[in-house]
């Protein structure tokens, strides 16, 4: 768990090449290094899902299937209880009419 750096170093004042080596040691013991490694690599425990995520997971597992070509098909998770749509109706209508004009050309 230490490092060794070695290689040729060119001296700016002379034409000869000087070879040097540097060894950098790690002050941690093997057990502590392994402990830190496993702390970093440890898989976090699964977090609990909220009701919306649970509904989405069950929809995915219940509706996923494969078609004749081997592609996966799954139903889209659509929210049926929409409380507020927002103020984008006017902009959406303008974009729709603009697209409609482009398509009639």
Image (tube, rainbow, N blue to C red):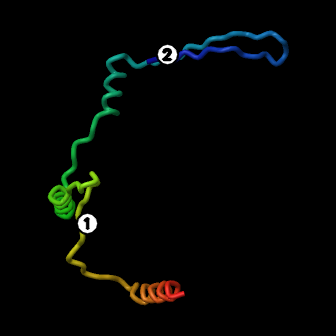
Q: Residue at horizontal 50%, vertical 88%?
A: 104
Image coordinates for residue 103, horizontal then vertical, percent: 49, 84
Question: What whole-number distance in Å separates the C-alpha atoms at marks 2 and 1?
Answer: 55 Å
User: Which label is found at residue 25?
Assistant: 2
Q: Is residue 50 visible?
A: no
Secondary structure of the residue carrying numbered label 2: loop
Q: Nearer the viewer, residue 31 or 62?
A: 62
Q: Residues within 10 Å of mark 2 (few under 14, many from 20)?
A: few
Residue 7 against residue 85 in the figure, above or below: above
Q: Is residue 21 above or below residue 28?
A: above
Q: Position of residue 85 (x, y in %)?
A: 32, 82
Circle 1 packing at 10 Å, graded few (<14), some (14-19), many (20+), is: few
Discs 2, 1 touching: Cβ within 8 Å: no
The mark lying in front, picked from 2 and 1, is 1
Q: Secondary structure at mark 1?
A: loop
Residue 88 at x, y percent in the picture:
40, 84
* Residue identifier under label 1: 76
- Residue 22 against residue 99 in the figure, above or below: above
Q: Is residue 12 left or right of residue 87?
A: right
């Amino acid at each position: 768990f230490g490092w060794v750096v070695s290689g040729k170093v060119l001296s700016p004042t002379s034409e000869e090449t000087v070879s040097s080596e540097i060894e950098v040691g790690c002050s941690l013991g093997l057990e502590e290094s392994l402990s830190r490694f496993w702390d970093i690599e440890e898989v976090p425990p699964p977090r609990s899902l909220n009701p919306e995520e649970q509904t989405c997971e069950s929809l995915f597992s219940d509706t996923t299937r494969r078609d004749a070509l081997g592609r996966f098909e799954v139903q889209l998770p659509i929210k049926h209880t929409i409380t507020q749509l927002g103020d984008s109706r006017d902009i959406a209508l303008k974009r729709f009419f603009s697209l409609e004009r482009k398509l009639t050309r």
